[in-house]
Image (tube, helix red, strand yellow):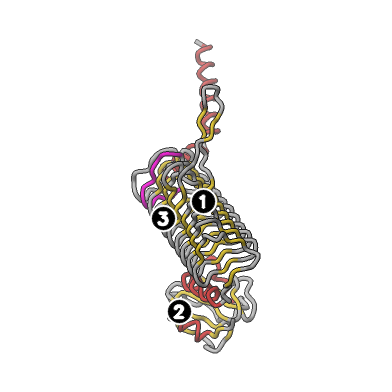
Amino acid sequence: MEFTAKVIAEFLTGEVIGDPETKVTNVAKIEEAKSGTLAFLANPKYNKYLYSTEASIVLINKDFVLEDTVSATLIKVKNAYESFAKLLELVEQSRPVKQGISSLAFIEESAKIGDGVYIAPFVYIGENCIIEDNTKLFPHVFIGDNVTVKKNSTLNSGVKVYHECVIGENCIIHAGAVIGSDGFGFAPDENNVYRKIPQLGNVVIEDNIEIGSNTTIDRATMGSTYIRKGVKLDNLIQIGHNVQIGENTVMAAQSGIAGSTKVGKNCQFGGQSAVAPHIQIADGVTVVPQSGVPNTIKKEGSVVMGTPAFNIREFQKSFIVYKQLPDLYKRVKQLENELNKLKGSE
């Protein structure tokens, strides 16, 4: 696809500084861009690249002050990062839309398939499934019995959705994700042999959710595991049985939420963070990467850090003392030695 600076500026309601007929056919990082590409500048760390970039067009913030001449055509916008994201959406939408059902897909007769769907080779769709309009199922997707996949959702290669689960509208599930596998439920008998507890519930994925590659979401023992609308999950995340993730919460890679925990709205979880079972996390909580949360967090908007996690300011103060422990230990030993010498001289 080819776009001029004028067309891009009109789409973004921006202002062109330079040649409005400058054309681009691709996007690139500002430090790696070549002629014919569009880049953006939002982080001050990259300001220096604006004056040396080979990009034909660069998006910049309206309040950016130039310190030197720039060879690229500039488009000033309110928020360069947000505008760049909108452009990427435009490019994505301009790609050819896949449609049609492959003869190499296997669909049970009782399944209901909507209009405008794409079902690739080697997809399996089980009994009594509902696949709504404009859904895309890529190769090796498995859809178990009685599953519903709602409008405009995309399941990429190798996604597995177990029986009875529900996928909402406008969802994107990336390769290798597993929705509805059994929760980790076992009970020891009198011989201390662990017996499996049947997992009879399901998983409900609401609308406008994105789930990363190789993320797993366990089905409920009874009832449902809920992922509420707007949630964004990175790759390699584990969500336990009967968990509830509140609206517009985001989680970075390798995070884990243990069973029956309820996470509020608009929370943020850094990479490799972990949450214990049967607790509650208030709305707007931020969990710093590699933190472990063992107890309920009641205060909305809290920022916690460490293992066990507690208030980030208190953690930072404690860590200053922690780093001084070797010196403090030496001083204590020195004082002990001096005290022993004084005792010996009495």
Tag of residue 12: 2
Q: Amino acid at mark 2?
A: Leu
Q: Which quarter shows the N terminus? A: bottom right
Kindly identify the residue that appears in the image at 54 percent across and 47 percent down: 181
Label 1 vs label 2, nearer the camera: 1
Q: Are marks 1 and 2 in contact (CB under 8 Å)?
A: no
Residue 114 in picture, x, y percent from top left: 49, 68
Spatial distance from mark 1 to mark 3, Cα to Cα? Answer: 19 Å
**Residue 91 in the image: x percent, y percent?**
55, 76
At mark 2, the secondary structure is helix
Q: In the picture, residue 212 is in which quadrant? A: bottom right
Compared with residue 192, is residue 283 higher up or lower down, i.e. above or below? below
| Res. 194 image quadrant | top right
Q: Percent position (x, y) of residue 5? A: 52, 84
- Confirm whether the magenta stretch covers residue 278: yes
In the rendered image of this protein, does residue 219 appear above or below residue 328? below
Label 3 packing within 10 angstroms: few (<14), some (14-19), many (20+): many
> Could you classify mark 2 by the number of other residues whose Cα lies within 10 Å: few (under 14), some (14-19), or many (20 or more)?
many
Q: Left or right? Give the position of 317 relative to 155.
A: left
Q: Where residue 59 sits in the image (x, y, percent)?
A: 51, 76
Residue 92 covered by magenta stretch: no
Labels 2 and 3: the sequence-earlier one: 2
Residue 94: tell me if it is visible.
yes
Magenta extent:
277-287
The three-letter amino acid code for the residue at tag 3 is: Arg
In the rendered image, the residue lying farthest to the top is 346
Which tag, 1 or 2, sits closer to the chain's start?
2
**218 or 68, which lies in front?**
218
